[in-house]
Amino acid sequence: MSSAIKNIHARQILDSRGNPTIEVEVVLFSGEKGVASVPSGASKGKYEALELRDNEPDFDGKSVNIAVDNVNKIIAPVLLNKDVTEQYNIDNILLELDGTQSKANLGANAILGVSLACARASANYNEIPLYKYLGGIDANILPVPMMNIINGGVHADNNIEFQEFMIAPVGAKSFSEAMQMGVEIFYTLKKILKKMGLSISVGDEGGFAPSLNNNSEAIEIIIDAIEKANYTTEQVKICLDIASSEFYNNGKYFIQGNYYSNSDLAEILENLVMDYPIISIEDGMAQEDWEGWRLLSTRLNKKCQLVGDDLFVTNISRIKKGIEESIANSVLIKLNQIGTLSETLDAICYAKNFGYTTIISHRSGETEDTFISDLSVGVNSKQIKTGSLSRSERVAKYNRLLKIEQQLGDSAKYFGINAFNPKIL
């Protein structure tokens, strides 16, 4: 069978932070190949699948030689001669081979690299683009980019607690127009920061990382950049990733030198939504603070998109609990949080069935791999997070989407404001 797997080989490469990660190549008897690399997050959810690292002196303990060996010596022999087009079968074999919920034996990075490389090899074997392979003829919606133009939290060496301050060009008529708007605002922001005597160095996700007086000042500077770039806050909205688990301790949230209860933080975030053109808030409460999430959802579920990242970790069991308790209304999707393509697709489908939006997301430690661009179109997610308008590992994802839009031609769709929850926005 020409679609059968002939060889699987993994190697250690470097991610955008210069840390080791894993790349996997799958070769078919037909001669077709598929290559995929695995990203890594700095801000990680407690319930994410395990990223296996060596914890040896080399690379400060971050090498992935064990994960590489797990692919080459354990996974590869089992998958040889298997039909690469049977994605769910391949992923089930990987899950059974590991035998743990967290993928602790083989490592989620090893498993995911194989899973994604198989999907790409299958798309190449079928001679169709990856997004068409994943989504079929319905794969024609370009996502609204949520561009992280000011970095804070663990993604930057500054004094801002909130992790991401993003812009969403909801007034654009197409993805390419959205990119133009984002670029013009990004470089207008650079001029404003420079004029203010603030740092224009960038953080892990390509956004600027200035030290500011508070989180609100970051929002106000972004609004200034939107307007100075000749756009309005009707055309370009603001999205936040609070990443509140990073400053949560003993039931309190530590912001700007003060401790706040979950009720206090819910009020703070509600006031921000009332005062500024914010349409999406990610991880407004910590991953363990279900009470806080209930408070926040009661206040904002009908006013703003509330995104669970650390809360849900692309895991159906946690998404189910959120749905049952009417918590949040959107799920951030990260392939390496769960560890296989099949489980990711299942999580997306489950969330959509209950009216939750899905946002395909990168990680702060990225590679040049553009799989998530094709995934976002393949599943018609309508929203994507892949960083700012600088750093090639971020821009590569945007460039891939521009190419997909061109390939789709007149059939390409861009939903703008209608991509967001709640629909009354």
Image (tube, rainbow, N blue to C red):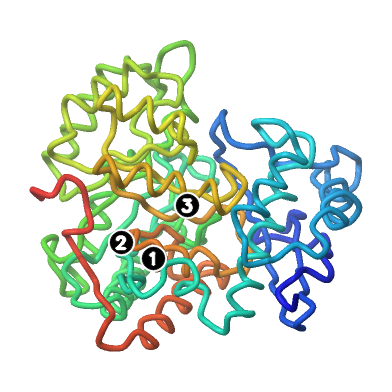
Q: Is residue 5 left or right of residue 407?
A: right
Residue at the left extreme, as displayed: 424
Residue 382's tag is 2
Q: Secondary structure at mark 1?
A: helix
- Residue 68 position, x and y percent, is 84, 53
Q: Which mark is in front, 1 or 2?
A: 2
Which of the two residues, 217 or 370, is positioned nearer the viewer here? 370
Query: Is mark 1 in CB contact (under 8 Å) with mark 2?
Result: no
Residue type at mark 2 is: Lys
Q: Please state if 195 lies on the left or on the right of 97 as rendered.
A: left
The front one of 228 and 399 is 399
Q: Amino acid at mark 1?
A: Lys
Upstream in the sequence, badge 1 or badge 2? 1
Helix, strand or loop for disc 3? helix
Name the residue located 14 percent from the left edge and 60 percent from the top edge: 233
Which amino acid is tagged 3? Answer: Leu
Instruction: In the rendered structure, find residue 194 and report the number of the disc placed on it.
Output: 1
Give the residue at mark 3. 345
